[in-house]
Image (tube, grey):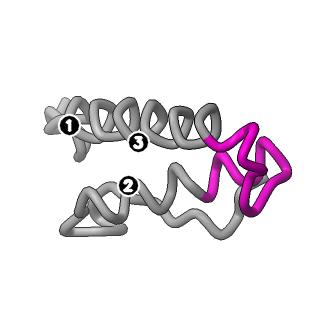
Amino acid sequence: MCRSIKTLRPPFQEEVTSEDISAAALQYVRKISGFRKPSHTNEQAFNRAVDEIAHASAHLLDALVIGSPARHAS
């Protein structure tokens, strides 16, 4: 679906800024809504969705555990 949104977790990205997360959220909302720039009537809902998705995305990235558990030899 949103093929141009890049993966924001290691090892794909070592440093992720709030701007990176907001840009991905904006791209996602644009794709879902079908609006590149919403009308004045829809602007508040559009911007709220971007903020909420960015917030949820930041929580997700903070909670992810990256790397595989150590394997024990049998």
Along the polypeptide, which appears first: circle 1 or circle 3?
A: 3
Residue 39 on image: x %, y %? 78, 50
Taking the magenta stretch, the answer to whether it contains residue 40 is yes
Q: Which image quarter holds the C terminus?
A: top left
Q: Secondary structure at mark 3?
A: helix
The residue beneath circle 2 is 21
Q: Main secondary structure of the magenta part?
A: helix
Question: Can you give x and y, in whole percent of width and height, for residue 7 in the image?
Answer: 46, 60
Residue 13 location in percent, x, y? 30, 68
Mark 1 or mark 2, which has the lower sequence index? Answer: 2
Please name the amino acid that badge 1 sits on. Answer: Asp
- Label 3 crowding class (10 Å Cα cut-off): few <14, some 14-19, many 20+? many
Report the side of 74 relative to 58 (left or right).
left
**Sequence-first disc among 2 and 3:** 2
Which one is closest to the eye, mark 1 or mark 3? 3
User: Closer to the observer: label 1 or label 2?
Assistant: 2
Q: Does the residue at mark 1 contact the one at mark 3 (Cβ under 8 Å)?
A: no
**Residue 73 appears at what percent x and percent y?**
16, 36
Residue type at mark 3? Ala
Residue 30 vs residue 59, the one in the foreground: 30
Q: Which residue is mark 3?
A: 54
Q: Are marks 2 and 3 in contact (CB under 8 Å)?
A: yes
Label 2 SS:
helix
First to last magenta residue range: 27-43
Relative placement, left or right, of 20 versus 1 is left
Look at mark 1 in the image and give the residue it sits on: 62
